């Protein structure tokens, strides 16, 4: 709260610095996602994947550090999705329609095990990555992985910018 400061001639009201509200960044956030979409179109990246990156940024926690972990989990999920897609293609002649469920089963087990291996337990972001790979319907290749990683990263970075700006504008707590 502010305080009234009285001098011998007049009273002045001084406001204490206040935190920047998240709501004040709504127009900025809208402009940033539009900018991310434009950047994806210019770079020939799938715009919807950038939106998935935006969503994955907010899956767990609200700090920049949390967002970085969330992005790392989504990118790891992309890798697991590429591996599952390749496994399903390889197993398809032998397993027929059961190749995809078997590959997704192993991907899901891998995601569950990652929380023990990495200590990062963000299952939604891992699954966003896997989902993006299968929904994209692109060929299984390193180029596909890098393309999807770039698009997810553009979206996550656009989501992070208001947090970066807010962090710079807020006074440091002593």
Image (cartoon, rainbow, N blue to C red):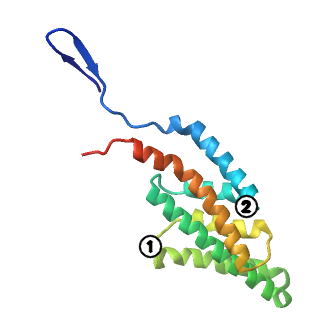
The residue at the far bottom in this view is 94
- The residue under label 2 is 43
Whether residue 94 sits left or right of residue 57 in the image: it is right
Q: Earlier in the sequence, mark 1 or mark 2?
A: 2
Q: Is residue 39 above or below residue 109?
A: above
Q: In this view, does 26 lie above or below 150?
A: above
Q: Residue at x 47, y 76 (%)?
A: 118
Q: Are marks 1 and 2 in contact (CB under 8 Å)?
A: no
Name the spot of residue 72 as percent of width and height, x first.
54, 68
Name the spot of residue 95 as percent of width and height, x first.
82, 87
The residue at the far left in this view is 8
Name the spot of residue 125 as percent of width and height, x first.
58, 64
Q: Is residue 57 above or below residue 172?
A: below
The label on residue 119 is 1
Q: Please tell me whether mark 1 or mark 2 is closer to you in this view.
A: 2
- The crowd level at tag 1 (other Cα within 10 Å; few <14, some 14-19, many 20+) is few
Image quadrant in which you'd find residue 145: bottom right
Q: Which residue is drawn at 72% across and 70% down?
A: 133
- Disc tally is 2
Whether residue 149 sits left or right of residue 116 in the image: it is right
Determine the secondary structure under disc 2: loop
Residue 103 versus residue 26: which sits nearer the camera?
26
- The crowd level at tag 2 (other Cα within 10 Å; few <14, some 14-19, many 20+) is few
């Amino acid at each position: 709260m502010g305080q009234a400061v009285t001098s011998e001639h007049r009273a002045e009201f001084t406001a204490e610095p206040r935190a920047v509200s998240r709501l004040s960044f709504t127009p900025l956030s809208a402009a940033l996602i539009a900018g991310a979409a434009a950047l994806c179109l210019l770079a020939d990246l799938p715009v919807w994947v950038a939106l998935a990156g935006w969503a994955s940024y907010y899956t767990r926690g609200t700090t920049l550090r949390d967002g970085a972990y969330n992005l790392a989990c989504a990118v790891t999920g992309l890798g697991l999705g590429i591996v599952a897609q390749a496994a399903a293609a390889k197993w398809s002649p032998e397993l027929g329609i059961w190749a995809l469920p078997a590959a997704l089963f192993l991907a899901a087990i891998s995601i569950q095990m990652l929380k023990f291996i990495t200590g990062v337990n963000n299952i939604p972001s891992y699954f966003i990555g896997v989902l993006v790979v299968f929904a994209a319907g692109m060929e299984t290749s390193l180029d596909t992985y890098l393309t999807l990683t770039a698009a997810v990263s553009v979206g996550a970075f656009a989501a992070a910018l208001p947090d970066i700006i807010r962090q710079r504008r807020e006074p440091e707590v002593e």
